[in-house]
Structures are given as C-alpha cells and as structure tokens.
Amino acid sequence: MKLLNVGGNDKSIRLPKEFEEFEHLLLDIDSTVQPDVLCDAREMTSKLDGNQFDVVYCSHNLEHYYEHDVAKVLTSFWHVLKDGGMLVARVPDMGAVMRATVEQNLDIDDVLYESPAGPIRVLDVMYGWSAQIERSGVEFFAHKTGFTVKSLVLKVQKAGFIGVHMATNNLEVWVWAFKNTVRADLLAKVPKN
C-alpha cells in the first residue's frame, strides 16, 4: 500500500507504527529536504494524478496554511486518495492550549511544555516554533491558522470525507477520515480509545 506523507520535512522522521510497512512517499514544498514529490499541497489537484494513494498522512502541516487555503489542501488530499483511502491528520489542539494557558496562568511567552528539541512556549504553538523559524530563516514554518477538535472535524467533513474518527492527546488533535467508503483494512489502523 502507498502512503503520501504531506509536509513531513524528513523521511527519517518515523511514521506511526501502523504505517511502517507502507510504501512511503514524502511530499514537501522545501527542495532541501529532498522530497519524493516537490509540490505545494494546495496544488496537488493540478500537479498530481488522482486516486493513487491508500493513505495521506499529514502531521503538523495543516496549521501552516491560511484558513482559506485549508479547504484547497483537503481537496488535494481527496484528489490523490483512492476510493476508500484514509486521511490521517494531526494538528495542535488550540482548545487544549487555551485551556492549559488559563488553568496554568501562563503568559504567551511562558513555556507550555518541554519537547525533545527544547522548550515550546504558548506563542510557539500559536504562531510556529520561533526558534526553528529564526534558525532556518524559512517563513513557511510559521503557523497561519489553528484548529480545535470541532473545527478540524467540520473542515474534513465539509471536504467530503466520511467515517471521521478523532482523538486528542498531548495538546494535539488526530483525525482519521475516509474517501467515499470506509475500507476495513484501513479502519483497523485507527487506534481504539
């Protein structure tokens, strides 16, 4: 089976174990990461053939598009997925971030959590990890929109996806959804809560 990893930045970043056996193609806008497919996710409908992937995996990439472009990106995912193909999307959970900020009495510049790469401030989750943006000089690492569970599920459904499943954990939202029909073999990849 074929998986398209959209905006994954580096093929050495491990996929969830459920997808390790898939043929893994990386799509990215950044040529320096040597993607298999060099393309802006908003343009996949015009630049890539449709109906070719079993899974589109998009981890912490949707928030890098302006809100009005998210529908274009989701339409592109729909385009490249086979019938019954599955979208797996992960984004920061802005609802959880806002709750944690209030409950912990945090300021926007306060550290929300420690990641393996270093401290992540409230501001970094909202607008993109400033240390990475500053170090790289690459502005497409900036966050241009945000999602809650409700807003992400609604956008995915509006794009035509069905059989939507979601979960929240560690200040992020996961969504699994299908094109046209729910394939049992891919449904088995959705974690049971």
Image: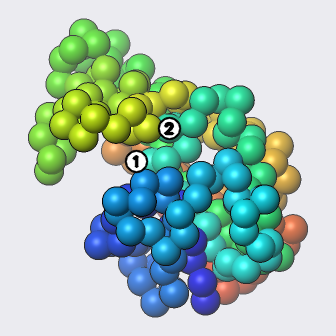
Residue that appears at 74% across and 41% down: 71
Q: What is the secondary structure assignment of the residue under circle 2?
A: helix
Asked if 38 appears above or below 110 in the picture, the reply is below
> Quarter of the image holding residue 145?
top right
Q: Residue at x 44, y 38 (%)?
A: 140
Report crowding for label 2: few under 14, some 14 to 19, many 20 or more residues within 10 A (C-alpha). Answer: many
In what quadrant of the picture does the N terminus appear?
A: bottom right
Residues under numbered marks 1 and 2 in contact, where contact means CB atoms less than 8 Å apart: no
Residue 181, position in %: x, y?
Answer: 85, 72
User: Which residue is more in the foreground, 188 or 37?
Assistant: 37
Q: Position of residue 72 (x, y in %)?
A: 74, 44
Frontmost residue, 36 versus 89: 36
Q: Residue at left 49%, top 74%?
A: 36
Q: 120 left or right of 166? A: left
Mark number for residue 169? 1
Amino acid identity at mark 2: His
Q: Residue placed at 50% from the left, 54% from the top? A: 29
Q: Nearer the viewer, mark 1 or mark 2?
A: 2
Q: Is residue 193 above or below residue 19?
A: above
**Callout 1: 10 Å neighbours few (<14), some, many (20+)?**
few
Q: Which residue is mark 2?
A: 64
Q: Secondary structure at mark 1?
A: strand
**Label 1 is placed on what type of residue?**
Asn
Between the residue at mark 1 and the residue at mark 2, the CA separation in whole angstroms equals 20 Å
Q: Is residue 17 visible?
A: yes
